[in-house]
């Protein structure tokens, strides 16, 4: 059974190098008594590289490194070669091939993969938030939301919430129905993160009739009645006036267009007129 020491050196946390090293070590009958893998993360200077080289010499170790910064990568390659220390550059060769094929300049930012992971988890969190707080199910989401969408039924609140969640915004939507009093917390929320979704009666009537047909119901139901629709829209105007938030007319807008206007507004890039 062989004894071995492997140093994983990185200008980030070193997880990539450690995973590769572990995968390779698993293919051998290695004596794992004592420390086989030694991780040396956050290498930022030539002095740090010198420490890795000295450690490798004292431990008679192999060095596996994932150094993104070009100058540091060249320096560690030179020092390891000079000291005849066995080593593997995990990322350098592939980076060179990718750069040649794409003709793009790399970012050369250590730890960038973890930023991408962070973005992914933020997106998942936002999607879960949108599902949990869909249709005003829990007023507790109002304080936590980045965006609060307010509108009558069939103004695309739910698909907008999901679309914006993919952009990593936590969105809660609140349906307005004359017979149901909105949660009192709605009137205490910062109006700058609230957006009212208005729609003209004719468009809403058409959308609701199509929805009733899809459900196998008669399109003469009160849900698509002109008088009922106007009642709901009047109630919408009353609530929005009380909240004091901006309004976007979604009558002729696609989901993507509406979402873009909302993002511009909440990011402070435009003023939305009611």
Image: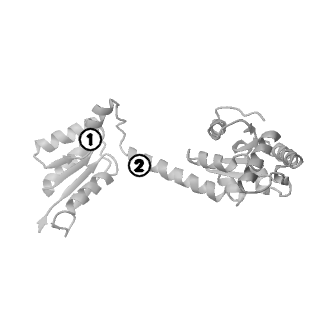
Q: Residue at x 15, y 55 (%)?
A: 61
Q: Percent from the top left, x then y, of residue 88? A: 19, 48
Q: Which mark is residue 114?
A: 2
Front of the two marks 2 and 1: 1
Image quarter for residue 217?
bottom right
Q: Which mark is residue 79?
A: none
Left or right of 256 on screen, residue 188: right
* One can see residue 131 in this view: yes
Left or right of 239 on screen, residue 41: left
Q: Percent from the top left, x then y, of residue 5? A: 17, 59
Q: Secondary structure at mark 2?
A: helix
Check the image and name the residue furthest to the top. 103
Question: Is residue 19 or residue 214 the one in the foreground?
Answer: 214
Residue 209 lies, with reference to residue 180, above or below; the image says above
Q: Which residue is mark 1?
A: 94
Q: Secondary structure at mark 1?
A: helix
Q: Percent from the top left, x then y, of residue 202? A: 81, 40
Q: Quadrant of the C terminus?
A: top right
For marks 2 and 1, give the CA distance: 19 Å
Left or right of 125 on screen, residue 232: right
Question: Is residue 259 or residue 62 the one in the foreground?
Answer: 259
Left or right of 127 on screen, residue 245: right
Residue 65 lies, with reference to residue 140, above or below; the image says above
The crowding category of the residue bearing disc 2, from other C-alpha atoms within 10 Å (few below 14, some 14 to 19, many at least 20), is: few
Q: Percent from the top left, x then y, of residue 152? A: 78, 49
Q: Earlier in the sequence, mark 2 or mark 1?
A: 1
């Amino acid at each position: 059974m062989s004894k071995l020491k492997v140093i994983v050196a990185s200008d980030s946390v070193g997880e990539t190098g450690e995973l590769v090293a572990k995968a390779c070590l698993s293919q051998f009958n290695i004596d794992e008594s004592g420390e086989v893998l030694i991780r040396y993360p956050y290498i930022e200077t030539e002095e740090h590289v010198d420490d890795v080289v000295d450690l490798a010499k004292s431990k008679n170790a192999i060095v596996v490194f994932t150094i993104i910064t070009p100058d540091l990568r060249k320096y560690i390659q030179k020092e390891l070669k000079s000291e005849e220390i066995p080593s593997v550059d995990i990322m350098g060769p592939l980076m060179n091939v990718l750069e040649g094929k794409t003709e793009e300049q790399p970012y050369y930012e250590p730890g960038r993969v973890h930023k991408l992971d962070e973005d992914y988890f933020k997106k998942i969190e936002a999607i879960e938030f949108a599902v949990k707080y869909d249709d005003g199910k829990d007023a507790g989401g109002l304080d936590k939301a980045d965006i609060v969408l307010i509108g009558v039924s069939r103004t695309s609140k739910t698909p907008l919430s999901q679309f914006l969640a993919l952009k990593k915004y936590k969105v809660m939507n609140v349906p307005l129905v004359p017979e149901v009093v909105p949660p009192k917390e709605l009137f205490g929320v910062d109006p700058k993160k609230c957006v009212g979704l208005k729609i003209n009666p004719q468009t809403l009537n058409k959308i609701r009739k199509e929805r009733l047909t899809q459900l196998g119901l008669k399109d003469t139901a009160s849900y698509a009645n002109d008088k009922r629709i106007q009642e709901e829209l009047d109630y919408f105007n009353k609530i929005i006036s009380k909240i004091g938030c901006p309004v976007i007319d979604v009558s002729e807008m696609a989901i993507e267009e509406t979402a873009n206007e909302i993002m511009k507004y909440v990011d402070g890039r435009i003023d939305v007129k009611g």
